[in-house]
Image (cartoon, rainbow, N blue to C red):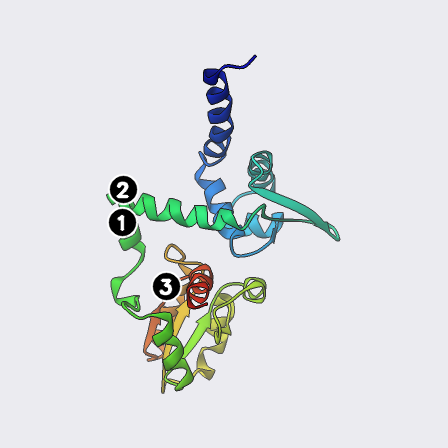
Amino acid sequence: MLNERNLKDLLYQEFARIGKSLSSPKRIEILDILSQGPKSVESLSKATNMSVANVSQHLQTLSNSRLVKSHKKGNFVIYELADTAISGFLKNVHTLSEKQFVEVQQIKQGFLNTNLGLHGITFSELQDRMEKGEVLLLDVRPKEEYDKAHISGAVSLPIEKLREKLSSLSTSRDVVAYCRGPYCLMSVEAVELLKTKGINAFRLENSVQDWYEFQEHLH
């Protein structure tokens, strides 16, 4: 018969499976990307700058830990998070890491010019300014991520298409760009591009997940 010590050992052994699967920085990055929506192995390879073979190995580890699941779509294998709770878990990992490690804060400041940020604005204020026509909100993530979920009122303009559409954007109102959250560089690049055209542009650190949490608190 199993005693209490054996039961605890078995329990914490199961808990440790999650920890082991997160021991690779690349696997955490893959989970972050999948929190935006399902992706093929090829898309993940491009986004992480890894070979398809390496991405497949990491996905197998994550699958074994039941953090991701997959299905076939034509000739492609599509991966997604196994549960919506994983997005919240990842956000908590980001928040805790930034709180505990000054290095995270330094790295963040290293790739985020503080002048790019839109500080102290709430979603309510942003929506109000959008409704008044004072602000254009751009979602610069890939189109499939926008189609999966986006902040209400946002216009899809993926970062790779922004340069060719730049000349058609009006300089008469502010532009706010967002992407996958505070550690995503696509919106940083977008703001820098917009400013070269003389557009008053800012970066919104909040993610689509933050938007949905805000909506839940309203109801």
Left or right, residue 183 beside residue 39: left
Residue most extreme to the top: 1
Q: Amino acid at mark 2?
A: Phe
Disc 3 marks which residue?
Answer: 188
Disc 2 marks which residue?
Answer: 101
Q: Position of residue 170 (x, y in %)?
A: 41, 85
Q: Position of residue 73 (x, y in %)?
A: 72, 53
- Taking depth in this image into account, of 8 and 206 the one nearest to the observer is 8
Alpha-carbon span between mark 1 and mark 2: 7 Å
How many numbered marks does the figure carry?
3
Q: Residues within 10 Å of mark 2 (few under 14, many from 20)?
A: few
Alpha-carbon span between mark 2 and mark 3: 23 Å
Q: Position of residue 17 (x, y in %)?
A: 51, 30
Q: Amino acid at mark 3?
A: Val
Q: Amino acid at mark 1?
A: Gln
Disc 1 marks which residue?
Answer: 105
**In the figure, 167 relative to 81: above or below?**
below
> Are circles 1 and 2 on residues that touch, CB within 8 Å?
yes
